[in-house]
């Protein structure tokens, strides 16, 4: 593929993939950016101090205590839902676990692949039934990703059906 075509495709992806664009910019420039979140219910959080590309690429030593505590429970075949730049997935893969990272963002998944994550898919958490049942021993949803479910009831139903 020509460089011009690659650049055009990247621009097209970036306009539809805000998280991916944030991650991609940090991956390429190592310059942090300011994250503003706008939810479907019109809640806008423009003051996410400390959030930005570098958080999504942070090494284990810079993770929060709760992240370190949670990751210690991961066992065997792990599904990382909304894996972002892959910091948790890559950490577990390095420990020898069989990790699959899924993310709805094509750019995030591309970054994970570039960083060495062996199993990745562009997939929404709503599509985890694409995996055969009993594919995973552990599911992780880090970085507030449990909020993707939108409600406790939906979380319970999604896990029950997978
Ligand atoms: C707050 S970031 C967390 C990334 C990573 N888990 C971490 O802690 O560094 C949220 C991630 O979830 C992804 N995401 C958003 N909606 C999703 C969906 N429906 N299914 C899967 N991933 C989704 C975003 O693209 C983004 O990479």
Image (tube, rainbow, N blue to C red):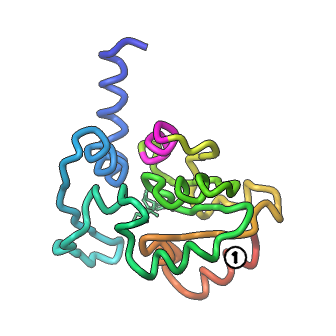
Q: Where residue 10 appears, x then y in whole percent?
A: 34, 32
Q: Is residue 36 above or below residue 14?
A: below
Q: Is residue 136 left or right of residue 25?
A: right
Q: Is residue 119 above or below residue 135?
A: above
Q: Residue furthest top?
A: 2
Q: Residue at x 46, y 75 (%)?
A: 67
Does the magenta stretch mainly form a helix, a strand or a loop? helix
Q: 81 and 90: which one is in front?
A: 90
Q: Name which quarter of the figure residue 152 lies in.
A: bottom right
> Is residue 2 magenta-colored?
no
Q: Name which quarter of the figure residue 156 lies in.
A: bottom right
Q: Residue at x 53, y 53 (%)?
A: 90
Q: Residue at x 26, y 44 (%)?
A: 25
Q: Circle 1 sits in a helix, a strand or a loop, which is it?
A: helix
The number of callouts visible is 1
In what quadrant of the picture does the N terminus appear? top left
Location of ligand 1 given as a quarter of the image: bottom left
In what quadrant of the picture does the C terminus appear? bottom right
List the residue tagged with mark 1. Answer: 159
Q: Which residues are magenta?
A: 108-115
Q: Where residue 44 appears, x then y in whole percent?
A: 23, 75
């Amino acid at each position: 593929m020509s460089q011009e075509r690659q650049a055009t495709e990247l621009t097209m992806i970036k306009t539809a993939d805000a998280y991916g664009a944030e991650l991609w910019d940090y991956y390429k420039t190592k310059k942090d950016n300011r994250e503003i979140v706008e939810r479907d219910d019109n809640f806008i959080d423009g003051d996410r101090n400390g959030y930005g590309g570098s958080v999504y690429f942070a090494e284990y030593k810079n993770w929060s205590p709760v992240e370190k505590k949670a990751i210690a429970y991961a066992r065997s075949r792990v599904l990382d839902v909304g894996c972002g730049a892959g910091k948790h997935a890559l950490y577990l893969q390095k420990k020898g676990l069989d990790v699959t990272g899924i993310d709805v963002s094509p750019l995030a998944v591309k970054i994970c692949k570039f960083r060495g994550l062996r199993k990745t898919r562009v997939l929404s958490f709503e599509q985890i039934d694409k995996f055969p049942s009993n594919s995973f021993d552990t599911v992780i949803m880090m970085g507030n990703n449990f909020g993707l479910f939108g409600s406790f009831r939906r979380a319970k139903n999604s896990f029950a059906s997978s």
